[in-house]
Image: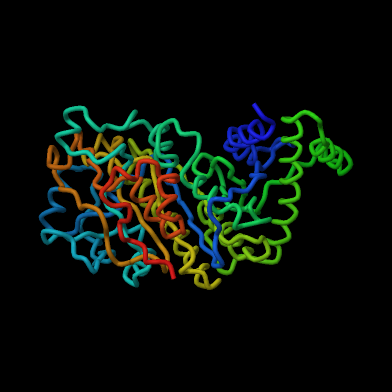
């Protein structure tokens, strides 16, 4: 094996680990950054960013976008019994898309999502209905015959990996593979191409790796024994050159990371948040993303992919008590982030989207819901073909035409198609789309139409 290939393998395999360590309190915690640039694609002259909000644990989609017409809500109430939202009060969050719901159906957002309704009404948000991880198009009959089932379908870890990477065992994520294509266009700012507030797989590429930040910005080498001198000695040791390829690669990563920390701290100091963000976990994560976007010229980046996350969605019980509050945190943070993009003049250049392990079962299991498959998601920004929905509004029926068992929905849209639509807007050329989304050729369409053509 050559030194170059060893170096690249080391960087790729340790990208996710370094991202995880970056949030640790240990003095040796580093942000692993890509040290080589891909040459397959340049970023162009304009700025563009994708922001993934991952709802870890599997959001209950049936209580996120809720039936409002009397007949469907009555069936929803019958099936979900103890966890259904009452009809009273849902009128205030009704969503009236320009492409009407089928069969006279009416739908409303969970009351906790009220801050997103004006954005939907004003064409800044679109809904993607019945999205799920798939290995290719599959019908209910094929699924029942054992054909086309993803591996470990209802497993949190495996389906999180499928959402983030495209398969259970991929070492790279589709966000990272997009970052690979634009590293060279970001030049010296390449280290800030893929930025995460926690979790590296989605942003791990073959050359790109996730750069970890916290609410205050980059994660510095921790102060050792309360001593400036000891800390300086540690930094010097970490950056010391070595004739051994892996030791030198580690030292090069340390040098790059420490230099990037200084650069980012300076840039963020000059760019406070343009609006007030909620003092919540997700609010603070999106605030630092907004500040990094505000710093884009200083950092020298033209394309960026961000990953933020919020846990707590695996509600096998206490769903009514907890779900609306979590959705409110998402809506408040997303609204503040959208307002920040408007204030910065980049609302048409930044697209935010939600993702989650999978949906939940239509039926309740006590006062919660079980692991499902297809789910509902939000896409936000001025480049979105807003006030509309794509995909399929599934039947509100157990053992119905979309139920693979236990009230789990057979997806109508694959994560691959959802990702490919976003990647195309981001600037991934048709010839590179299969590099980012390897299975996209299996589907009739690689573009679901919820994004406007880039200008």
Q: Residue 182's x, y, as percent?
A: 55, 54
Residue at the extreme right: 229
Q: Is residue 136 left or right of residue 188?
A: left
Q: Is residue 355 left or right of residue 195?
A: left
Is 97 situated above or below 162? below
Colour scheme used in the picture? Answer: rainbow
Q: Is residue 281 visible?
A: no
Q: Residue 67's x, y, as percent?
A: 20, 55
| Residue 412 or residue 340, whichever sits in front | 412
Q: Is residue 351 left or right of residue 146?
A: right
Quarter of the view holding residue 23: top right
| Residue 433 or residue 53, whichever sits in front | 433
Q: How many marks?
A: 0
Is 50 situated above or below 237? below
Q: Is residue 231 left or right of residue 206?
A: right
Quarter of the picture containing the N terminus is top right
| Residue 304 or residue 124, whichever sits in front | 304
| Residue 200 or residue 330, whichever sits in front | 200
Quarter of the picture containing the C terminus is bottom left
Q: Residue 308's x, y, as percent?
A: 51, 49
Residue appearing at x 51%, y 39% in the figure: 201
Residue appearing at x 84%, y 39% in the figure: 236
Residue appearing at x 58%, y 50% in the figure: 39
């Amino acid at each position: 094996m050559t030194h170059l290939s060893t170096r690249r393998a080391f960087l790729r395999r340790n990208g996710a680990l370094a991202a995880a360590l970056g949030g640790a309190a240990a003095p040796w915690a580093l942000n692993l950054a890509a040290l080589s640039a891909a040459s397959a694609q340049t970023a162009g002259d304009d700025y563009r960013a994708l922001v993934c909000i991952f709802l870890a644990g599997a959001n209950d989609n049936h209580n996120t976008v809720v039936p409002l017409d009397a007949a469907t809500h009555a069936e929803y109430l019958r099936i979900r019994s103890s966890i259904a939202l009452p009809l009273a009060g849902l009128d205030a969050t009704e969503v009236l898309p320009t492409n009407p719901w089928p069969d006279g159906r009416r739908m409303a957002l969970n009351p906790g999502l009220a801050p997103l309704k004006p954005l939907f009404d004003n064409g800044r948000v679109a809904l993607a209905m019945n999205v799920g991880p798939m290995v290719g198009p599959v019908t209910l009959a094929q699924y029942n015959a054992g054909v086309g089932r993803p591996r470990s379908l209802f497993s949190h870890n495996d389906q999180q990996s499928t959402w983030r990477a495209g398969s259970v065992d991929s070492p790279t994520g589709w966000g990272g593979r997009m970052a690979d294509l634009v590293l060279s266009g970001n030049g010296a700012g390449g280290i800030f191409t893929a930025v995460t507030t926690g979790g590296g797989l989605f942003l791990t590429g073959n050359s790109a790796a996730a750069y970890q930040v916290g609410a205050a910005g980059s994660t510095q080498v921790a102060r050792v024994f309360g001593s400036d001198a000891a800390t300086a000695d540690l930094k010097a040791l970490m950056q010391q050159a070595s004739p051994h390829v892996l030791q030198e690669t580690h030292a090069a990563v340390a040098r790059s990371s420490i230099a990037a920390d200084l650069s980012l701290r300076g840039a963020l100091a000059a760019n406070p948040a343009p609006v007030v963000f909620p003092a919540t976990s997700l609010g603070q994560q999106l605030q630092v993303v907004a500040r990094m976007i505000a710093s884009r010229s200083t950092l020298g980046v033209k394309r960026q992919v961000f990953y933020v996350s919020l846990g707590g969605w695996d509600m096998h019980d206490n769903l009514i008590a907890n779900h609306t509050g979590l959705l409110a945190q998402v809506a408040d943070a997303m609204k503040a982030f959208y307002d920040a993009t408007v204030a910065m003049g980049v609302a048409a250049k930044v697209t935010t989207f939600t993702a989650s392990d999978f949906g939940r079962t239509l039926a309740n299991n006590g006062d919660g819901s079980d692991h499902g498959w297809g789910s509902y998601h939000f896409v936000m920004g001025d480049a979105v073909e807003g006030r509309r929905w794509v995909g399929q509004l599934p039947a509100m029926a157990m053992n119905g035409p979309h139920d693979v068992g236990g009230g789990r929905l057979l997806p109508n849209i694959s994560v691959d198609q959802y990702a490919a639509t976003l990647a195309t807007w981001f600037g991934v050329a048709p010839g590179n789309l299969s590099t980012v989304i390897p299975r996209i050729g299996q589907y009739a369409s690689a573009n679901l139409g919820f994004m406007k053509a880039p200008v």
